[in-house]
Amino acid sequence: MKTAYVRVVCDITCKCGSEPPRYRVYVNDELFAERTWIWDKVYLEEALQIEAPYGAYPVRFENVDPDCGTFKFRNIRVEEGPGRIRIFNGVTLIEVHDESS
């Protein structure tokens, strides 16, 4: 089974309350990251490094502590490798494909 490496990046901002909120990132229902937001008035780039067989993988961002803050996840993009981002029926997909196609 052939695989490809894809690096996906997303911009994240947060409006925090009194306690630092956390977020999680899942790819194909596998936990890729869990972070506690400790910054003020900045945005971060979350990078997902994926080595996977060709196919489409749903990506999901989850606010673990919605009472502590609000996250915005924007501008998800492929920065390296043979892939693209697609929205299908409201689900964000990372498509990994053969470089020759």
Image (spheres, rainbow, N blue to C red):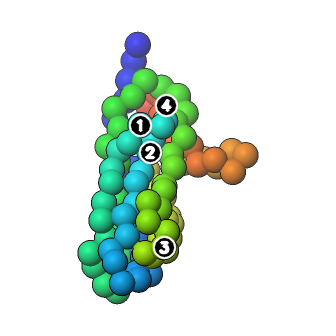
> Mark 3 vs mark 1: which is more N-terminal?
1
Type of residue at label 2? Tyr
Q: Which residue lies under the disc numbered 3?
A: 67
**In this rendering, is residue 30 above or below 11?**
above
Type of residue at label 1? Glu
Residue 33 screen position, x and y as percent = 33, 50
Q: Mark 2 and mark 3 in contact? Answer it, CB < 8 Å.
A: no
Q: Mark 1 and mark 2 in contact? Answer it, CB < 8 Å.
A: yes
Q: Foreground residue, 89 or 101? A: 89
Tell me the tag on residue 7: none
Residues under labels 2 and 3: Cα distance? 21 Å
Q: Mark 4 and mark 2 in contact? Answer it, CB < 8 Å.
A: no
> Mark 3 vs mark 4: which is more N-terminal?
3
Residues under labels 3 and 4: Cα distance? 39 Å
Question: Dot 2 lies on which element?
Answer: strand
Type of residue at label 4? His
Q: Residues within 10 Å of mark 2 (few under 14, many from 20)?
A: some
Type of residue at label 3? Asp
Residues under labels 3 and 1: Cα distance? 24 Å
Q: Which residue lies under the disc numbered 1?
A: 30
Tell me the tag on residue 26: 2
Q: Residues within 10 Å of mark 3 (few under 14, many from 20)?
A: few
Q: Mark 3 and mark 1 in contact? Answer it, CB < 8 Å.
A: no
**Which residue is rendered at x = 45% and y = 76% of the image?**
69
